[in-house]
Image (cartoon, rainbow, N blue to C red):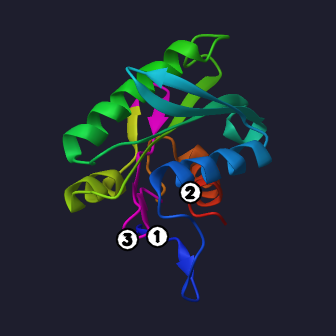
Amino acid sequence: MSEQRFEEAGEAREPSDPAAYLAAVAGRLVADGCSTRWEDWAGVPVLVGRRSDFRLRWMATKLHLFTVGAAVPEITVPVVEGFTEQVMKYAKDTKGGLPVGLQNGVGAFPVLVSDRVDPAAVAWAEERQRVKFACMTRPVVVDSSRSYVGMYRGRPVLGRVYASHFIEKGSRYFDGR
């Protein structure tokens, strides 16, 4: 099961307020060396974190990793699906440098936080990594009312070389580990 409760020993490790959760994520992104900023996306404050990493074991490629998060009134499958598409396009359009695919990959964590979450949206996020030519996304659905983080934590065939990186960053950023 890839849903993770972010509490231990009966004590909440993260605030249940969606805005406070995103502020905590922003702090963990900075602590991990990401640049962060807040943007306005159609009147919604959106956290944008970014880092680039190069590894020889990734077939000598650079991965541009974006974390884009927002607190929303409710998370449904169409909401998380649409946000994931927006984040993928944003990351691809703003990464800079060589075109995607030429020793460059783009990874993204589209993060939505709410206290009203359709269980189908959590299942959609946990189902698989989404991939479009050298662009990989792992949607994250945070149900702040139940202290759950739902995201794909597996090792897919496409993009497998980056799987450990995604799993480690996802646990660090969203579970607070």
Q: Are marks 1 and 3 in contact (CB under 8 Å)?
A: no
* Quadrant of the drawing holding the C terminus: bottom right
Residue nearest the viewer, comparing 17 with 64: 17
Q: Secondary structure at mark 1?
A: strand
Q: Which residues are magenta?
A: 132-153
Q: Secondary structure at mark 3?
A: loop
Look at label 2 and name its amino acid: Phe
Q: Quadrant of residue 34?
A: top right
Residue at mark 1 to residue at mark 3: CA–CA distance: 10 Å
Q: Which residue occupies 37% across, 71% down?
A: 146
Residue nearest the viewer, comparing 60 with 98: 98
Residue 20 picture location, percent across and down: 55, 53
* Label 3 Cα crowd, 10 Å radius (few <14 / some 14-19 / many 20+): some
| Sooner in the amino-acid sequence: mark 2 or mark 3 | 3
Position of residue 73 relative to residue 54, above or below, is below
Q: Which residue is mark 2?
A: 174
Look at label 3 and name its amino acid: Arg
Residue mark closest to the camera, 1 vs 3: 3
Look at label 1 and name its amino acid: Gln
Residue at mark 2 to residue at mark 3: CA–CA distance: 14 Å
Residue at mark 2 to residue at mark 1: CA–CA distance: 9 Å
Q: Is residue 88 left or right of residue 165?
A: left
Q: Which residue is mark 1?
A: 4
* Quadrant of the drawing holding the N terminus: bottom left
**Magenta stretch contains residue 139:** yes
